Image: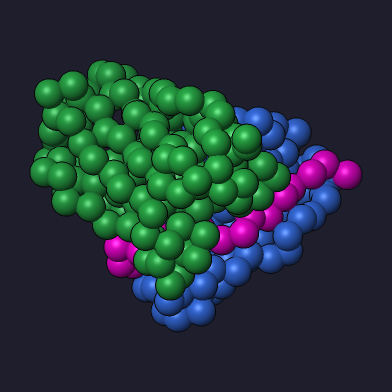
Chain colours: A blue, B green
């Protein structure tokens, strides 16, 4: 079974900083990767699918890249409303697996 | 605008069966373009996919070997006449205490995809005597 590992588990950055976080699959999953944002006490929200396709309404400061086993979510200019935990999810087959999450805080 | 709403008991006793229903409004569970899923999140922890169901009632689950915590205890069903789908999780323990979300799989040009674009608000289920 394919495992999804996210790093770091948490990070702290200043408003305006460029923030990157990683999601690694234990086997290649092509570009079948989605990213979700979950703000504290809220429902997960789809940000990106197909590794790099922004869901409608998601700010353009979010971007995704990668392929195969290594993927990255980037926030180009961190905003206070981006405080959240971010989860990746692989969907190359019908076994849907989430990563453990990266918690983003403001310094 | 499609909306999902989970419903069910907030407290279940150990060894009993957890039963939740997800009511779909603004859309139809019978649509061939979508699958419907259940995901859970223990307090303070990450997301775990439980399983999903198609419009015709076919199901697929997190494999037991992969999810020792679920171990084939989950059954998902759909009721197209009532426009809802349900989750039953048998022989619950404290480890099943979690927020349970229902969600819609996204659609790619009319074909179901395997990530989630619309989520319910979630319902906390506590397993305790």
Residue at 82% across / 42% down in the picture? A106
Q: Is B46 left or right of B120, judged from the image as shown?
A: right
Residue at 46% across / 49% down in the picture? B91
Residue A98: give x, y in percent of width and height.
51, 58
Q: Is B2 left or right of A80, judged from the image as shown?
A: left
Residue A19: give x, y in percent of width and height.
71, 54
Residue at 41% across / 23% down in the picture? B7
For the record, the magenta segment spans A89-107
Quarter of the figure that contains the C terminus of chain B: top right
Identify the residue at the far right of this view: A107
Residue B33 shows in the view: no
Q: Quadrant of residue B10?
A: top right
Q: Is A37 left or right of B89, judged from the image as shown?
A: right
Q: Quadrant of residue A8?
A: bottom right
Q: Nearer the viewer, residue B89 or B32?
A: B89
**Tag count:** 0
Q: Nearer the viewer, residue B86 or A12?
A: B86
Q: Nearer the viewer, residue B45 or B7?
A: B7
Residue at 43% across / 62% down in the picture? B71
Quarter of the figure that contains the N terminus of chain B: top left
Q: Is B76 left or right of A38, judged from the image as shown?
A: left
In the rendered image, residue A95 lying in the magenta stretch gets the answer: yes
In the rendered image, residue A41 lying in the magenta stretch gets the answer: no
Residue A87: give x, y in percent of width and height.
57, 53
Q: Quadrant of residue B23?
A: top left
Q: Nearer the viewer, residue A52 or B12?
A: B12
Residue B57 shows in the view: yes
B33, above or below B29, in the image: below
């Amino acid at each position: 079974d394919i495992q999804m590992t996210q790093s770091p588990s948490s990070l702290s950055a200043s408003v305006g900083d460029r923030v990157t976080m990683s999601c690694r699959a234990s086997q290649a999953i092509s570009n079948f990767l989605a990213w979700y944002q979950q703000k504290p006490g809220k429902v997960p929200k789809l940000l990106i699918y197909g590794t790099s396709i922004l869901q409608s309404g998601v700010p353009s400061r979010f971007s995704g890249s990668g392929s195969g086993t290594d993927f990255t979510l980037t926030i180009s200019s961190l905003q206070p409303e981006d405080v959240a935990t971010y989860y990746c999810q692989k969907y190359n087959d019908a076994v849907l697996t989430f990563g453990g999450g990266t918690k983003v805080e403001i310094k | 605008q499609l909306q999902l709403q989970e419903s069910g008991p907030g407290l279940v006793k150990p060894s009993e069966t957890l039963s939740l229903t997800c009511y779909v409004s603004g859309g139809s569970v019978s649509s061939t373009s979508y699958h419907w899923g259940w995901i859970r999140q223990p307090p303070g922890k990450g997301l775990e996919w439980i399983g999903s169901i198609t419009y015709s009632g076919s199901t697929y689950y997190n494999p037991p070997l992969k999810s020792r915590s679920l171990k084939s205890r989950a059954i998902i069903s759909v009721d197209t006449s009532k426009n809802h789908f349900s989750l039953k999780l048998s022989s619950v323990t404290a480890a099943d205490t979690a927020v349970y979300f229902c969600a819609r799989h996204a659609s790619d040009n009319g074909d179901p995809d395997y990530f989630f674009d619309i989520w319910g608000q979630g319902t906390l289920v506590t397993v305790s005597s």
